[in-house]
Image (cartoon, helix red, strand yellow):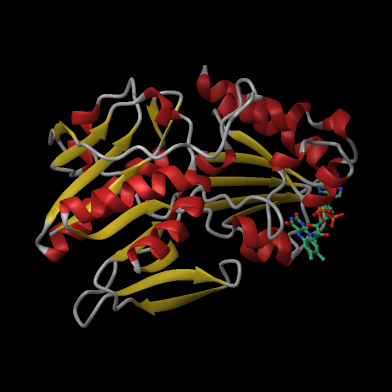
Amino acid sequence: MSVLVYIDHTDGEIKKSSLEAASYGAQLASQLGVAAHGLVLGTLNADLPALGKQGLQKVHQVKNDSLNQFDPGQQAAMVAEAVTNLGATVVVVSNNVTGKALGPRLSARLKAGLVAGAVALPDTSNGFVVKKAVFSGKAFAQIAVSSPIKIIALTPNAFSVTNGDGSAEVADINLTVPAAKIKVTGTNKIKGQIPLSEAELVVSGGRGLKGPENWGMIEELADLLGAATACSRPVADSHWRPHHEHVGQTGGAVAPNLYFAVGISGAIQHLAGVNRSKVIVVINKDPEAPFFKAADYGIVGDAFEVMPKIIDSVKKLKG
Ligand code: FAD
């Protein structure tokens, strides 16, 4: 019996969300008194034994360059075979774009209950009950899973990465590699951008900034802090900013340690994508703006006066 964590990677590096999944899987394994294993499909530059720091005891790998390009059907078949061969009873994936494609396919193949969007370790005192966010993060549900094999898709940024001093054993595993059904003909990378879903810090702007020409201060603060940039939906709809920056109910969801909201009203549809941020700072000239109710720190003021002062202060702090 073991917990098997699917290790997701891009450009040869392990994604942060997979380090969270590994930390989660290892703690769950220790709670259940079983082994914690990882599965890597593809060839990585990353230091796989270092996954022991997150608590994995063993990492199984299929070294094959063709697997570096994620094909959900192909990889689901391989993970399912690994689960059967290794006798894993719980599979942990991140509920990121890869895990969202993998989880349901694995669930169908293994006839396993899937909890997509888990936010905490399961309660195993009486069965196997997993907490997940529902209704765009406005409520939580407790999902009891009774199937022999269980799949958990962990919400990114919901669980901290542990950093112990363990070292994982790495071993090749022999799995059938089915033909890929997806052929990638090209990729278009956004240079220098921190992916929003992985960002620890986010500086976000809304319609209060009046136009795209005023985004310099958002970008400057983001650069100084090493943050990703985001925006509200009308900003993306007006083509002031690219659509991949739009957060909220109909955009991306973020869960950074710090979400800096500038000139955003805080409509419920926007909050749905940002309400898992640990600390929210709001700058808005309207003291009645709804965002202040969700804010940890609020500055009532004109963004065009407040932002340059914040930027100056950060520059001074950085020396
Ligand atoms: P506004 O509502 O125009 O607010 C601008 C804010 O800036 C105001 O609070 C104002 O006081 C402040 N401001 C103005 N000037 C300044 C200044 N100089 N300095 C400081 N503050 C200033 N929205 C999303 O963001 N994400 C979504 O995913 C999303 N999905 C939606 C789905 C549906 C089905 C619907 C109906 C709506 C959705 N919306 C979404 C839209 C949402 O309801 C709001 O209309 C939108 O979030 C408002 O964007 P905003 O706060 O940038 O603009």
Q: In this view, does 163 lie to the left or right of 209?
A: left
Residue closest to the eye, 288 or 174:
174
The quadrant of the picture showing ligand 1 is: bottom right
Report x, y in % for residue 241. 80, 36
The residue shown at (60%, 67%) is: 136
The residue sitting at 51% across, 51% down in the picture is 101
Task: Identify whether 121 is placed above or below 139.
Answer: above
Quadrant including the N terminus: bottom left
Q: Is residue 226 above or below residue 139?
A: above
Task: Residue 73: give x, y in percent of width and height.
Answer: 47, 47
At 77% from the left and 52% from the top, the residue drawn is 264
Where is residue 223 shown, x and y percent of the image? 61, 24
Indicate the quadrant where residue 217 lies. top right
Q: Can residue 119 be seen in this view?
A: no
Q: Judge whether residue 317 can be spotted in this image.
A: yes
Residue furthest to the top: 319
Instruction: Tell me where residue 86 appears, x and y as whole percent.
Output: 16, 51
Q: Nearer the viewer, residue 62 or 15?
A: 62
Direction bottom: furthest residue: 126
In the displayed structure image, the side of residue 43 where residue 132 appears, left or right:
right
178 to 111, vertically: above or below = above
Question: Outermost residue, left direction?
Answer: 33
Q: Quadrant of residue 315?
A: top right
Looking at the image, which is closer to me, 14 or 161? Answer: 14
Q: In this view, does 145 lie to the left or right of 126?
A: right
Q: In this view, does 21 lie to the left or right of 184?
A: left
**In which quarter of the view is residue 66 placed?**
top left
Please tell me which residue lies in front, 199 or 123: 123
Query: Number of marks in the image?
Result: 0
